[in-house]
Amino acid sequence: MATVAEHIETQDHAHGHGHEEHHEQSFIRKYIFSEDHKVIAKQYLFSGIIWAVIGGLMSLVFRLQLGFPEMDMAWLKPVLGQWVSLAPDGTGKLDPNFYLALVTMHGTIMVFFVLTAGLSGTFSNFLIPLQVGARDMASGFMNMLSYWFFFISSVIMFWSIFLETGPAGGGWVIYPPLSALGEANPGSQSGMTLWLVAMALFIVSSLLGGINYVTTVINLRTKGMSFDRLPLTIWAFTFTAILGILSFPVLLSAALLLIFDRSFGTSFYLSDIYINGHALPNQGGSPILFQHLFWFLGHPEVYIVILPALGLTSEIIATNSRKPIFGYKAMIFSMAGIMFLAFIVWAHHMFMTGMNPFLGSVFMLLTLIIAVPSAVKAFNYITTLWRGNIIFTPAMMFAIGLVSFFVSGGLTGIILGNSSLDIQLHDTYFVVAHFHLVMGAAAIFGMIGGVYHWFPKMFGRMMNDTLGYLHFWLTFIGVYLVFFPMHYIGIAGFPRRYYQWSGFETFNTFADLNAFMTIAAILAFAAQIIFIYNFIYSIFWGKKAPANPWRSNTLEWTTPINPGHGNWPGEIPTVYRWPYDYSKPGSESDFIPQNIPFSATPESNLPEENEMISEEKEIEKIEFNHNIPD
Amino acid sequence: MKTLETTMIQETKPILTVNKYKFIIWLFIITIIMLFASQTSAYLVRRAEGNWTEFKLPVIFWWSSSILIISSVFMYLAQQSAKKDNYGKLKTYISGAFLFGIIFLAMQYIGWLELQDSGIYLKGNPSGSFLYILTGLHAFHLISGLVVLLFAFVASYQLKIHSKSLIQIEVCATYWHFLDLLWLYLFVFLLYFR
Ligand code: HEM
Ligand SMILES: [Cu+2]
């Protein structure tokens, strides 16, 4: 592919653009208060990984409690302090309230801090400018603000763990009145206050980020990068950002009213409550109102988590199958469909709130329709893999793992979506199994796959493949071993968020299954240590990366191995074709990057592409309007 | 030959047709719309459940609404003057917009006092609480609008806003008119669904 090099060289420096020059910056501006999207992406990535470790360790603690209810936890006393109470004989027990706090914090951290900020924050920031051909985000300053709001939010959330009364304990969905009244649960005292403050800041951060992503994609595409040539990653990030822009303000609304109920004595969510025989003054509120507001965000939020992972997967699977993605347009339309439907299905989380059964069946119908675009996506991945020339890189393994989890978790979604079945399954471990497969595991796999795939671009080095395969197999098997049995105990009726079940005679038969899941969880967590070792080691001592290690078509691989500020040293490459020209018949090379004009590849052009050669001159002529400052 | 080239360039449209800051402010406005849409729908849902104390809006809200409209008109005139490089008028109008914005806030506050006199407090039946939250949230956003306006105000006194540099005042005006419309929406909403 000599043409690639030639093409880049022939582009000259004619359009002097303000951002290209390297100005030396101080350490603080370069690595801490940086406005460079690549640095901000890495900041998000590191923060996300740290949060993932914290969230993961929390899950191990409560899994130990669930798997081995009689276990002596005294050895955790040095870490958990007062949350482990010692009996006179020296054995320790986990405090039940702290169990609830752990579950709550685990959910909050994983959903928001890892899979929203860590995932979108990392990859939208890193890939949007690189893949659409922009020097940086639309507003570097807003981007920096977005990270630092997230950082402050993280600090507050972290701080809440160390409160005397413990962090929030009302579940990640913080339903009032449980979360509104300090008497209900110690976590609903200062812990909940900090939770709300942290989440308000988090929402500000996501909005700043999301607004920036959409603006960059719409306004800063390079010449020739029309919408039908955008990589699916970019489509996914854009839809994710739109979902966030439309739904996070609603969470803010819900949180705001809760703050008023908690601190200023209003009664939006509270009514007819008696504590120790005394009636509270609050009258006329409705706790169901909170659930409506919460799930109006909550359901789109689950797609905010999975869509970027699906986008990354599209890219990884197409590249490593050496085949064009199957159904490019179908992928876009199904993502758009998912996005639209995501806003009108929220009440499937509320079938048990006593809603009108007719309304329930409307939401049931809408919910089941979501299965259609989801299935389209799953089939498209499988058909892209079908008879592909598959290269099993670690990233590819994780991407395929994602498809597997998405399918097996999606199936149980269809079961839950039936309002009559949900009466039995709501708030059991069946739901926990459903969303950990379809959202938790799938999104984490997308994120990890993304790290393996774009690591060479981020750090200029390669990660170790052998450790990658080991990491994949242990995690993949571990995840299924944890969450598959969970379906059974869910069907058997195990309610979620219970500290222990040993009080129920019937549940004792499942004690060994619970112990088994705990051991599998420890295994899956241990596998992540391999990843973290590999990640850190490779940053410093990994093999030096070549310019385009996966022989991929997208623009980020046309930048220098360690792209500087402004991404491309010369002019930004022009785009002439879609990003999925892999193994094109007639072409000698099995990939043709987006910046190769059709005029350079007469041997592989389709008839309609030959016609587009005449348009190339037009594309090159496009003048950016330099009167518009950026 | 030369003419041919220039016509060619004119024909190929630039990609960047919208300024990114204008785009950003529109997205920002959408987030605010979602915030208030959720608040007002929560209001309606809650109201439909009954146990709802009706309230009377303070009379001064009528006056404050007109003040805010006038402020918007000033904003519009300021933008027009900037287009014509009429610095003197620009400064007057933008000061007017700012001043009327502050008067509006003061009147909203008086409105709250009036409400308290008539026995409607933040605590109590959710209808009253919602009234305070909706007006308060709007006032909060108006203050953010005043901050944006203040930057434009300073820029216009430094003669940085003129016919060649309109982005700032356009962004500012878009936001300010939006806040005006938002108030009118809330006002009519509250009048209608008491
Ligand atoms: C085939 C499509 C899907 C259907 C029909 C579906 C249906 C449902 C239903 C009905 C529930 C409520 C269960 C209950 O609480 O009783 C639920 C819970 C959940 N779903 Fe799905 N789902 C689907 C796909 C997804 C996807 C793709 C994700 C995330 C990426 C997801 C994430 C979740 C989460 C996080 C919960 C639990 C929230 C909680 O209560 O803590 N689902 N799903
Ligand atoms: Cu849902």
Image (spheres, helix red, strand yellow):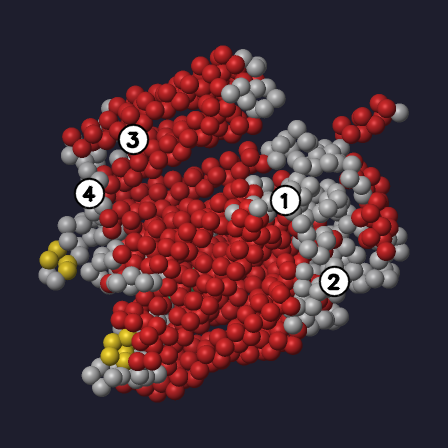
**Chain letter of the residue carrying label 4:** B
Residue contact at pointers 4 and 2, CB within 8 angstroms: no
SS of the residue at dot 4? loop
* Position of the C terminus of chain A by quadrant: top right
Q: Quadrant of ligand 1?
A: bottom left
Percent of width and height locating residue B90? 49, 16
Residue A259 shown left or right of residue A114 in the figure: left
Is residue A265 placed above or below A486 in the rendered structure?
Answer: above
Q: Amino acid at mark 4?
A: Lys
Q: Amino acid at mark 1?
A: Glu
Percent of width and height locating residue B43? 31, 42
**Chain letter of the residue carrying label 2:** A
Q: Which residue is mark 4?
A: B123
2 or 1: mark nearer the eye: 1
Q: CA distance from mark 3 to mark 4?
A: 21 Å
Q: Which residue is mark 2?
A: A546
Label 4, ligand 1: CB separation under 8 Å: no
User: Which numbered dot is residue A489?
Assistant: none
Q: CA distance from mark 2 to mark 1?
A: 26 Å
Quarter where residue A586 is shown: bottom right
Is residue A189 placed above or below A618 in the rendered structure?
Answer: below
1 or 4: mark nearer the eye: 1
User: Which numbered dot is residue B191?
Assistant: 3
User: Which numbered dot is residue A24?
Assistant: 1
Task: For label 4, count other residues whose C-alpha is less than 10 Å away and answer few (under 14), some (14-19) or many (20+).
Answer: many
3 or 1: mark nearer the eye: 1
